[in-house]
Amino acid sequence: MKTSINDFIAGLEQRTPGENEFHQAVEEVIGSVWDFYQQNPRYQRANILERMVEPERVIMFRVPWVDDQGEVRVNRGYRIEFNSALGPYKGGLRFHASVTLSILKFLGFEQTFKNSLTTLPMGGGKGGSDFSPKGKSDGEIMRFCQSFMNELYRHIGPNTDVPAGDIGVGGREIGYLFGQYKRLKNEFTGVLTGKGLAWGGSLIRPEATGFGAVYFAQHMLKRLGLDIEGLTFSVSGFGNVAWGAITKINELGGKVVTLSGPDGYIYDPDGIAGEKVDYLLELRATNNDIVEPYAQEFGAKFIPGKHPWEVPVNVAMPCATENEVNLDDAKELAKNNCYLLAEASNMGCTAEAVDYLIENIGYGPGKAVNAGGVAVSGLEMSQNSMRISWQKEEVDARLKVIMENIHETCVNYGKMAGTGNKVNYVKGANIGGFVKVAEAMLAQGVV
Ligand code: 2IT
């Protein structure tokens, strides 16, 4: 079946009206792989792309729970089982007021290629709820998690679908979800990753996304003849990913001067290090979702209602949520001679920002840069299956090798013709991720 890229996208939009984030994620991948796809009639004959953009299964369910005042509340739960060509569905759960079907479909779609890039046997999935943990008590969060699992448990399993954390789902939530799964199934298995260390979790998993992102940025910088030592970084967000990235940047001799929340950003020219990094954990534990208290605590500057991209730095690392870097931000970074932007978040940049960044400064897309998180989830699954736990050094060493290989894959598939040494990491990551999934789908027939 012959079709044009525009017809393909038009068809997708018609079938999935209003799913803007999902369209954005698909358009980016299709734009990268289209020529490659056209050169491979085998893929076309099997209609691989049409199948890839259709999730294998979408589960939506009611999540009723009782708040501390005794009121009955209702949220919507989701699990998108997107693609199982390479292994059990694998990907996080996001609990945030902004969660919609479109957001989870974009995340599940991206996850499929990201997981492929890790080289570990994991398919792609994503889930979550529009439940906002902001301002909720511990008891409310537990009751919500239990109710969420009362439905989810029948769809997941260590060989079927293995959820983990994402925004709003950390160690505490994984604990409550795991406890309820165990009670319902009467099974202690590796059904979730990001577990506590005492009960099946992996060392380095909490740090993995941030550490991996910095390892990836390190390889990007190396190609430019640069080293992290002595460079300044801007980071957005103040959650788990930001915390891991800041920790590793400090360890490698860089300086981080910003972090941010929904309320604005912090500018701390002295660098966010030592007790200030520990303070991030305290800030998060308050469940208020604001960063302003950091400014009072350490005498730094708080800029309300803005993102940190106007601050001149050598490297920018978005570590929060989607579309928080727009075209103007990208131009501002380039104007300030920023060397590169490495996306530790998922789809942190708008499509226009991505195009501009590729042409003007270095750009590492989330599905490559942040793959260290799910990679260590994959290592947690291996450890659970073997009923052993590896030392910190062993997990970190494996993470380093995985990130180096992902970088290598991006360079192999993403070299820009006629530019000498330049790499289009978006193209590299998308084709690199696509090939394995496509080959597995071909081999497995029309399923
Ligand atoms: O976006 C992501 O890769 C994650 N939230 C981690 C998923 C996982 O299964 O560890």
Image (spheres, grey):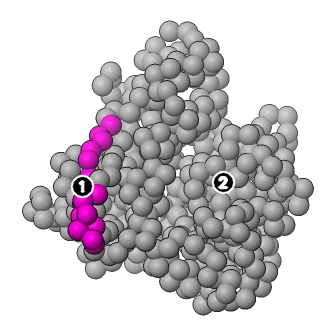
**Callout 2 crowding tier (Cα within 10 Å): few <14, some 14–19, many ≥20:** some
Residue 392's place in the image compared with 412, above or below, is: below
| Front tag of 2 and 1 | 1
Amino acid type of the residue that numbered disc 2 sits on in the rendered structure: Glu
Instruction: Report the residue at 85% width, 39% height from top.
Output: 419
In reply to whether residue 320 is colored magenta, the answer given is: no
Residue 10, which numbered label?
Answer: none
Position of residue 306 measured from the top left corner of the image (x, y, whole percent): 72, 63
- Which residue, as the protein is rendered here, is positioned at the far top? 1
Quarter in which the C terminus is drawn: top left
Front residue of 361 and 170: 170
Is residue 130 visible to us here? yes
- Is 383 displayed left or right of 41 in the figure? left
Residue 324, disc: 2
Identify residue type, mark 1. Answer: Pro
Nearest the viewer among 8 and 221 is: 8
Q: Is residue 411 above or below residue 8?
A: below
Along the line of sight, which residue is nearer the eye, 174 or 310?
Answer: 310
**Dot 1 corresponds to which residue?**
64
Instruction: Give the x, y percent position of residue 318.
Output: 65, 60
Rate crowding at label 1 as few (under 14), some (14 to 19) or many (20 or more) other CA atoms within 10 Å. some
Position of residue 425 in the picture relative to residue 182 (left or right): right
Please state the extent of the stretch shown in magenta in the rendering.
Answer: 58-73
Which quadrant would residue 315 be assigned to in this image? bottom right
- The x, y position of residue 280, in whole percent, is 56, 80
Q: Secondary structure at mark 1?
A: strand
